[in-house]
Amino acid sequence: MSPEKVLGVPFNNPDLLAMALTHRSISSDDPARLDNERLEFLGDAVLQLIVTTKLYEDYPDLPEGQLAKVRAAVVSGSTLAEVARTVDLGQYLEMSPAEERSGGRSKDSILADTLEALIGAVYLDSGYEKTRDAVLGLLSSRIDERAKNPGVKDYKTRLQEVLASDGRRPSYQVEGTGPDHERSFRASVSVDGRAIGAGDGKSKKAAEQSAAKQALEALS
């Protein structure tokens, strides 16, 4: 798959595509090069609009609070990184040798930011409608899944709400192990100094969610 086909839209302006795939570590080494940070800023706004519009139109019975939760889950860094991996976006990135050695091609934050930059580039190159179709081609199933069960997978929020009823709050501790390109994390969650859950994940957020899920099961 070529980088142009990641979103299924051919580029009229190849410079936009190249910029979308250029990590800021390149411009740090060569100030004359343009990186993808400005495109990421634009792409984030376009992505938010596309997802918000679909939710508004397709789920008229969902209240505003639930719509916001679904949108936040769909456009989260972990979800975007997951989508980026499904299309092998990391292999097309241009980054400094140092960033690559640190595992940059597999980092959630870099993959998510690059996908947003690519969305911004498609928007500038092809307009809103083609960008919308491309984004929904990648995200529709995830939007529908989250909209049918809003908040179900957000175990941290649910745990916080359960504990708040008794005036208590959860406290998380996270430890990472392994090299940067294969980093794994283990989180534990405590209440009043007592551990009530633990979990693992490929990111800190994922590990915390896993720990919160175990805590909820223990409390129930």
Image: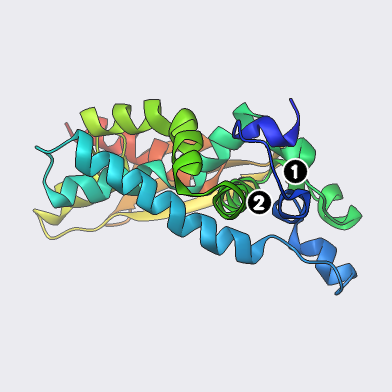
Residue at 44 percent across and 49 percent down: it is 47
Is tag 1's residue or tag 2's residue first in the polypeptide sequence?
Answer: 1
The number of numbered badges drawn on the structure is 2
Residue 207 seen in render: no
Do the residues under discs 1 and 2 have CB atoms within 8 angstroms? yes
Where residue 181 sits in the image (x, y, percent)?
75, 42
The CA distance from mark 1 to mark 2 is 7 Å
Where residue 204 sits in the image (x, y, percent)?
52, 48
Element type where label 2 sits in the image: helix
Residue at 64 percent across and 50 percent down: it is 114
Residue type at mark 1 is Arg
Quarter of the image for residue 4 reads top right
Q: State the residue position of label 2.
A: 110
Q: State the residue position of label 1.
A: 105
Colouring rule applied to residues: rainbow
Residue type at mark 2 is Ile
Relative to 23, residue 87 above or below: above
Q: Nearer the viewer, residue 85 or 178?
A: 85
Relative to 29, residue 22 above or below: above
User: In the displayed structure, does residue 125 sit left or right of residue 156?
Assistant: right
Residue pushed farthest bottom? 31
Relative to 48, residue 9 above or below: above
